Image (cartoon, grey):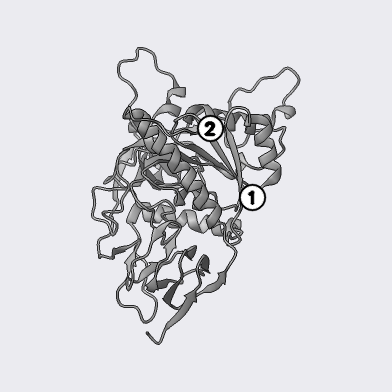
Amino acid sequence: MSDFAKEWVLEAETEFRFELDVGASLAITLVRGQAEIFGAELVERKPYLFGSECKAAVFTWVGCTIEMSQPSTEYVSEETPMAAYGNLHIAFEQMRVRTLAKLRGSPVPEAPTAADPPRIMVLGPENSGKTTICKTFGWSPILVNLDPNEGGWAAPGAVSAAAVHGPIPTSSPANPLGSASTSAPTTLASNAILPIVYWWAAGIIVDTPSSFGSGPATNDHRQKLIRACIDAFRINTILVVGHEKLNVEMQRAFGSLLTVVKIPKSGGVVELDHSYRERVHMYQLHAYMYGETLPFPPGIKAATQGGETLTDFTLSPSSTVVNFSDLTIYRIGAETMAPSSALPIGALRVVSEMQPVPVDPSQPGSGLLNAVLAVLSHRNPDENERYDEELLDLTVVGFIVVTNLDIAHKKNDGSLANTRISCRQDRDSRVL
């Protein structure tokens, strides 16, 4: 054992929880036994590297011994919700087996419910561990990230969906749902998310933002969002994480239409403040543009990130200068919008929360400097009429960062102001 390493012996059905400080890194090695991190099993004698203020836990069903270098905040807990999560996994697996039997024309095992694949929506307030729970359910489902705060497999601010073909590695909050595939060399090749497969039988898991699970039960806007999600993904199971009032609300609203299950919140869930979330957004955007390589802690000369050997490959975004006239830029909704109750009697909104509003880069206060812009796919060329609202239905094919605005030339008639943008062009995000 290294002079910098510390050894922990974990009993069966316990977990080692750790939190990393800013700039700190940690390497964990499974010495003996069996262990996993959010459903991803660890391999013996293989150091796993963590960084970027990662907060995670090593769980074992049968007991194990782990060794780590330069530990940060750490403790072992005997109270975990993994048994309840395991029972849910078995129930969802039975739903998949019945669905496959029906699709193949085989006898369908008797069950109180129809032979449908699990289509799960996970609800809960902020800091309840929804994303962690979604990562523990496997068998190649479609994982849908509806939380713009997470970013999923893209830049922060996006919603996305992808087929998960294996355990999602956890090493950094910069890639909370694993690494997406790219045409450039990366440190995570075989674990990269691949195109959609097996979605019909394996089911759908929908990770929702905290706004779905907080606020008064009479909030019509929140209820409309939840119902729209249920209809869009044909949800048949709602999991409510550690919130009795929300569970009662969902039972009353949807209990007659689908299954509502309350599951325990893990005691290891960390309360995340606003400054931490801002730093995580920075980590995610930097990892999207440049890739991510975590530093080795003292005493560690070789380790894996997300279960794979680290390499020296990094991504290199390209920079280019384009004319304002070559871009059409929109902002969704107004930056500041008064509530409807503040409008004059009988007055209607001119701009809705979801209406695309054109942005003129040459105007002061455009807010484009250092902004992150989503590049949308082409509109349907077969349509005779086009509307700005169609933008809401287009997929995102990449992101650009505006690093400079040159508006001085607008004083000359006929001249075009330029914007210098830094654009990562080596990957098709295909974000919804």
Relative height, residue 102 to residue 49 (above, below): above
Corner quadrant of residue 107: top left
**Label 2 CA crowd tier, 10 Å (few <14, some 14–19, many 20+):** few
Closer to us: 243 or 369: 243
In percent of width and height, residue 349 lies at 63, 23
Corner quadrant of residue 329: top left
Relative height, residue 14 to residue 248 (above, below): below
User: Which residue is at a point 72% across and 38% down the rendered structure image?
Assistant: 216
Q: Looking at numbered disc 2 in the image, what kind of residue is underneath it?
A: Pro
322 left or right of 77 in image: left
Pointer 1 residue: 242
Any mark on residue 401, and which?
none
Mark 1 element type: loop
392 left or right of 42 in image: right
**Label 1 CA crowd tier, 10 Å (few <14, some 14–19, many 20+):** some
- First along the sequence among labels 1 and 2: 2
Q: Give me the C-alpha separation between circle 1 and circle 2.
A: 26 Å
In percent of width and height, residue 209 lies at 56, 43
In percent of width and height, residue 149 lies at 52, 47
Relative height, residue 52 to residue 427 (above, below): below
Pointer 2 residue: 112
User: Which residue is at a point 52% across and 49% down the rendered structure image?
Assistant: 87
User: Which residue is at a point 27% across and 48% down the rendered structure image?
Assistant: 182
Mark 2 element type: loop
Image quadrant holding the N terminus, namely bottom left
Q: Would you say residue 110 is visible in this rendering?
A: yes
